[in-house]
Image (tube, grey):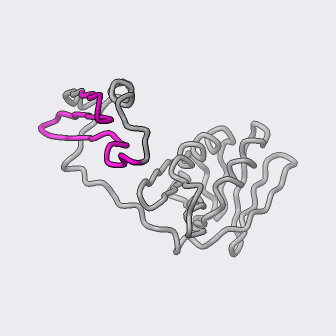
Amino acid sequence: MNINCSKSELAKGIQIVQGAISSKTTLPILSNLLLETQESELHLAATDLEVGIECLVPAKVIEPGGITVPARKIGEIVRELPEAEVNITTKNSSVTLECQKSVFNINGLGKEDFPQIPKLEKENSFTFKQEFLKEMLKRTSFAVSREETTRALNGILFSISENELKLVATDGRRLAHIKKKSRNT
């Protein structure tokens, strides 16, 4: 693999997918990010086998390929790079990041061992503007239980039906409920 991309775009993409990395994992590959080329983009992915996050970063692909690298290490390195173009190359299981006068080598693992993130079916989906979903989450998340003893109440229920999204959360004392129709934008 050999690609060039913007440091700011790469840092933003890494920060997004790092949200799926668990600090306590028994499989070393789950603390890694998948870096893989796709036409004129770099595909970044991370998963903890419960949550998976994928992101595409605009890049100039010179040679296609893919590898997984430790998420924390690459995140720290990219954050400290100067604001310039980053060249990422792989050789065997090693990744080299070059940016201006900085050169970093990171040992990675083969992409073959990285768990496949399931693809979502388009037939049971619809589109919301980001601010609508953020607002809905803000209006329900306060009622989520924070106690470990009530694990069934530690989340928000997402219910999708007839182009309508409903969010419900409770901690056993409070109940929050909100619903919105899809805007299909």
Q: Residue furthest left?
A: 162
Residue at left 72%, top 69%?
Answer: 94
Q: Position of residue 145 (x, y in %)?
A: 38, 37
Residue at left 46%, top 51%?
Answer: 53
Residue 113 vs residue 63: left or right?
A: left
Residue 45 vs residue 135: left or right?
A: right
Name the residue nearer the viewer: 9 or 118.
Answer: 118
- Above or below — where is 1 with respect to 56? below
Q: Position of residue 87 (x, y in %)?
A: 72, 53
| First to last magenta residue range | 149-177
Residue 160 vs residue 71: left or right?
A: left
- Above or below — where is 119 with respect to 29? above
- Above or below — where is 120 with respect to 58? below
Queried whether the magenta region covers residue 175, the answer comes back as yes
Q: Position of residue 34 (x, y in %)?
A: 56, 61
Q: Quadrant of residue 132?
A: top left
Query: In what quadrant of the picture does the N terminus appear?
Result: bottom right
Name the residue nearer the viewer: 161 or 41.
Answer: 161
Name the residue nearer the viewer: 27 or 151.
Answer: 151
Q: Position of residue 152 (x, y in %)?
A: 32, 48
Query: In what quadrant of the picture does the C terminus appear?
Result: top left
Q: Residue furthest right?
A: 101
- Above or below — where is 71 with respect to 28? above
Residue at left 65%, top 62%?
Answer: 69
Queried whether the magenta region covers residue 43, the answer comes back as no
